[in-house]
Amino acid sequence: MKSTHHIEDPDVVLIGAGIMSSTLGAMLKELDPTLKIQLYEMTEGFGEEASSGWHNAGTGHAGLCELSYTPDYGPDGEVAVGKAIEIFNQFEQSKQFWAYAVRTGMLSNTADFINPVPHLSFVYGQEQVDFLRSRFKQMKAHHFYEAMTYTEDRDEIKALAPLLVEGRDDTPIAVTKMELGTDVNFGALSGKFVEWLGKQAGAGYATSHRVLDITKSNGRWTLKIKDLDSGRVFTNTAKFVFIGAGGGSLPLLQKSGIAEAKGFGGFPIGGQWLVCDKPEIVEKHMAKVYGMSPGAAPTMAVPHLDTRVINGKKALLFGPYAAWTTKFLHVKGSITDLPASIRTDNIASLVKVGLHNIPLVRYLIQQGTQSMKTRMGELLKFYPAANPEDWELIDAGIRVQAIKKEDGDAGIVHFGTEVITSQDRSISALLGASPGASVSTNIIVEVVKRCFAEKLATPEGHERMKAMVPSYDEDLSLPEHAERQRTLSEEAFKTLNCIR
Ligand SMILES: Cc1cc2nc3c(=O)[nH]c(=O)nc-3n(C[C@H](O)[C@H](O)[C@H](O)COP(=O)(O)OP(=O)(O)OC[C@H]3O[C@@H](n4cnc5c(N)ncnc54)[C@H](O)[C@@H]3O)c2cc1C
């Protein structure tokens, strides 16, 4: 896996070997095989930060079960489901691209990175049950969710997910189910894309290499890079740079000095999971079960009890428990990351956001320091018969949420993903993390549209992109595209071995 293959003065430098840079590398090389591409990653492997299997929940987010995408009732008095539909539409593009990659031999052994796992929403108490029933009614009416089922019947729920019912009192409960949900190991997927890229002519990657600085002169970007094994510092240049460095993106973007980066700040949120690998418990649960967000919890702290398939082994994961941190990266981060990101152009926004979000900061500190007994309290709401001895606490990845200058007054922490591109389109960076890896193909298609528009403008480029992501210029959520969506989705799921 380790490689220090350097392409001198390539067309494109990709920073980071997570799902974002690896997807862009694979897509660009397929779009134009003559492009010279070099990737640098500072850890020893691929996808070891936020994209790593254990650092995220691996949910193929398609709005099937995540109640945080449908938090409110609309003006018609029913739950508004527009956001879920948007995410479903974006996840379709990921499925299409991954299926293309399997068909063309870029990816192999689908079970290493994607497995079918039903997605369930689970609620308890009459108010939540009424909410889920309305959500179901609205979703079922759209062709994306026509296969969704709903039940309040305990025996039926027990058959779907026995752990939810074992030892439960008689408070009303309800569940929706989408059979065709997925569990994705984004770290494994990232690694497969990077390894494929490294085998192509005119492409290379170097792990244990940290990009220290980015500056522009004479129409090219110069990158200062450190080989972390030897300590050697050297430079390389590129026409285009993609900063897909996850939590490491903000500091690099600030170093680039582009006007578009001014005023951005980062708000890191750490996380933890409870994990169980006892076969007798793991085998009783085959679903990703998402509940409702408790009180002050940020949207990404919605609890869920998940089947995970990592390195061919099944396990159960529960969480996330959010945590306060000042690190931007899990593996190679430092507690000085947050203070070091403070600049004159973002300090006002950071202070205002800090002041406006004292309850969030308090919540994060309280979450990170709570006892095992309190953590178990959350799990018991999902799995009333859970035994603390069967569960172990592990660290999840860190999300660095974006703070924009213009939102400083309002004190907003953005939970979405921001793509920041220079006016001359020679550099692009991703900030933020949600819904993240699942919609990586859609995000990267947007980067390609913005920064490589000339390649899509030729008939050959358009045809190549259509082959990779057939719906890249279509809206599959429109009723007139329902049949096409069903066909594309089924083809992709079959290729990805998610339909048995
Ligand atoms: C707790 C949690 C749960 C999540 N759950 C889900 C989920 O269920 N489904 C989902 O779709 N998404 C989920 N996400 C979001 C998802 O994990 C991220 O959106 C996604 O992994 C981000 O990928 P990336 O490539 O941008 O970043 P990363 O995977 O972090 O990759 C960035 C890479 O850049 C490298 N790097 C950084 N700085 C430098 C530098 N200076 N030089 C060289 N290399 C550098 C890092 O080492 C890293 O490998 C979750 C995230 C968290 C934290």
Image (cartoon, helix red, strand yellow):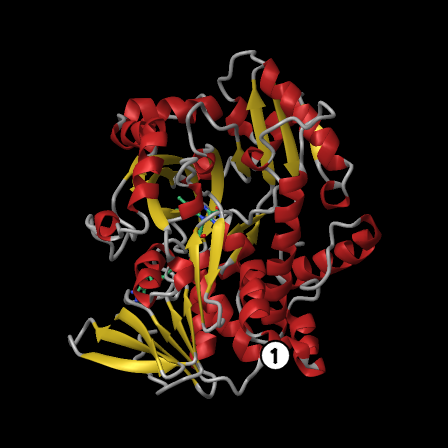
Q: Say which residue appears at 63% left-offset and 59% top-offset.
A: 93
Instruction: Determine if residue 451 is in view.
Output: yes
- x and y, in percent, of residue 31 in the image: 59, 78
Q: Residue furthest left?
A: 231
Relative placement, left or right, of 201 versus 399 is right
Ligand 1 lies in quarter: bottom left
Quadrant of residue 267 in the image?
top left
Residue at image location 51% in from the left, 73% down from the top? 26
Judge by depth and name the residue closer to the eye, 168 or 135: 135
- Of residues 127 and 182, the one drawn nearer to the viewer in this rendering: 127
Quadrant where the C terminus is found in the figure: bottom right
* Residue 207 showing in the rendered view: no
Please give the residue where the numbered disc 1 appears in the rendered image: 455
Residue 104 lies, in percent from the top left, at 61, 76
What residue sits 38% from the left and 53% below the top? 50
Q: Nearer the viewer, residue 347 or 412?
A: 347
Look at the picture and state if 296 lies above or below 170. below
Percent x, y for residue 14? 40, 72
Residue 183 drawn above or below residue 196: above
Q: Is residue 299 above or below residue 424?
A: above
Badge 1 crowding class, 10 Å Cα cut-off, few under 14, some 14 to 19, many 20 or more, is some
Q: Amino acid at mark 1?
A: Lys
Residue 394: x and y in percent read 30, 42
Res 297 quadrant in image: top left
Which quarter of the rendering shows the N terminus?
A: bottom left
- Relative placement, left or right, of 435 versus 154 is left
Seen in the image, is 375 located left or right of residue 33?
A: left
The quadrant holding residue 157 is top right
Q: Residue at x 47, y 46 (%)?
A: 308
Which of these two is toward me, 165 or 368?
Answer: 368
